[in-house]
Image (cartoon, coloured by chain):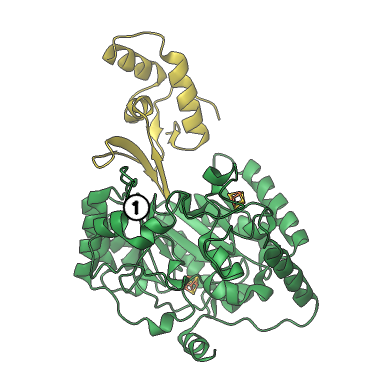
Chain colours: A yellow, B green
Amino acid sequence: MSLQTDQAIKLSSGYRLQWEDAQQMFVLLYPEGLIELNQSSAEILQLCDAQHKLADIVQTLETKFSTTGLKNDIVSFLTIALDNGWINQSA
Amino acid sequence: MAGSIKAPSPPRWLLAELTYACPLQCPYCSNPLDYANIKDELSTNDWKRVLKQSRDMGAVQLGFSGGEPLVRKDLVELVDYSHGLGYYTNLITSGYNMDKEKIIALKNAGLDHIQISLQASSKELNDFIAGAESFEHKKHVAKLIKKNGYPMVLCVVLHRQNIHQMKEILEMAIELGADFVELANTQYYGWAQHNRDQLLPTHEQLQTAEAIANQYQASQKGKMKIYYVVPDYFEGRPKACMNGWGTTFLTIAPDGLALPCHSARQLPNFDCPNVNEHSISDIWNDSTAFNYFRGDRWMKEPCRSCPEKDKDFGGCHCQAFLLTGDASNADPVCDLSPLHHTVTDAIEQAGQVSQTVEQPLLFRNPKNSKQLKKSP
Ligand code: SF4
Ligand code: SF4
């Protein structure tokens, strides 16, 4: 399975992204698992909402942070996320 | 604690052991041997207070376990309340007594996930280990769990009597549509420790099983995630204790005892605080029990000067106590421990037992629990 550019990305079923006040960070929750996310990972995962494709995510974040050249970092994070089953692209 | 200014990291995982009652009798159960004498159970309101206080501190993963949590009449109410607090709620069940109505009621209450355990891949062995006819029903329940849209973890505890079924167990997991499979080699505490000679697998059994697990991990990639938990007895290095004592995990026993690890109540002269007397934040931040093995000040040699001490934190203190009589010793699973032979001897002894007469397994039930308490 590799990242498809023409399909929207979504969190896998059973996975939940949530802001934690006590820790002041986003966490990814799934059956018996918990991942504490740094800011950039959290920004990317928030856009994995079954609406955005890769290019949309890159563009949204580059606009949001008034920068360019984020694509490589985003692709490598999403590839890890896909490999770990946190996100998927099938309908 | 004098001299320490940094507050401990908050609890992230709360394990709510709702009850020690269980209709099954697994001889590897991690519950205390004398569980039948622990009768007091927290009330619904006590649990709500614990859930709220823990959530306020930062706990976000919540496991309802036991015993069998389905025995508690207020389970749906507690799930509903926890969901409202923002927990990710996991139910850890044997599936016994589960039915369609309950699965739906729990779903409506916001339950996020169900872990169901089977004892083996064949009816005969499953029912023998569980001490009750349950195999067909469990499989039926597993299908209902999937049908109702839950992610499902299928858990099978491995030991000498079922580890040869590895392949069949994994095929069964595929058939049942498990999202995750947890193949956990028995950890030797509680009842498992008592039955160790009958449960400890041989080295050859383990190697075969591990090879099969690896093979399925590769072929199921992207479909079903397989966790194979290697038994620490055969490893040479201990498992990291609970991600560090008092750093992440908080267990509350049925009677309200707060435990830094689920076997901590068997440590002698170790006063675990009770939620009936203290708030969760007092327990977590200030109690002697939770501070006891924090950091490395408690360590003796060989751990104290060991370059790996930040990796495994000296291993499991309960195991150190069980095998060496002192919880502050290095976990003897570590081959740097001067008492490592307590582990190799056990492996050898179990190997001999497996070749001679099988001693009967002692099943986990109230009668055996009470009798054990009486005998010295
Ligand atoms: S391990 Fe077996 S006996 Fe122990 S609580 Fe779980 S199902 Fe019950
Ligand atoms: S000596 Fe202690 S700290 Fe070092 S590896 Fe062994 S158990 Fe871990």
Quadrant in which residue B71 is drawn: bottom left
Q: Give the residue displayed 25% in from the left and 42% down from the top.
A: A22
Local secondary structure at mark 1: loop
The percent coordinates of residue B158 (x first, y second) are: 62, 64
Quadrant in which residue B192 is drawn: bottom right
User: Which chain does tag 1 point to?
Assistant: B
Q: Nearer the viewer, residue B373 or B48?
A: B373
Count of picture labels: 1
Amino acid type, mark 1: Asp
User: Which residue does the numbered mark 1 point to in the structure image?
Assistant: B112
The percent coordinates of residue B361 (x first, y second) are: 63, 81
The percent coordinates of residue B175 (x first, y second) are: 57, 56
Q: Give the residue displayed 32% in from the left and 17% down from the top.
A: A61
> In the image, is residue B332 above or below residue B4?
below
The answer to whether residue B225 is seen in the rendering is no
Badge 1: how crowded within 10 Å, few (<14), some, or many (20+)?
Answer: many
Q: Give the residue displayed 57% in from the left and 59% down from the top.
A: B184
Quadrant in which residue A51 is drawn: top left
Q: Nearer the viewer, residue B207 or B49?
A: B49
> In the image, is residue A37 above or below residue B162?
above
Q: Is residue B154 left or right of residue B64?
A: right
Q: Give the residue displayed 37% in from the left and 33% down from the top.
A: A37
Q: Is residue A56 left or right of residue B152?
A: left
Q: Quadrant of the C terminus of chain B?
A: bottom right
The answer to whether residue B51 is seen in the rendering is yes
Q: Nearer the viewer, residue B78 or B359?
A: B359
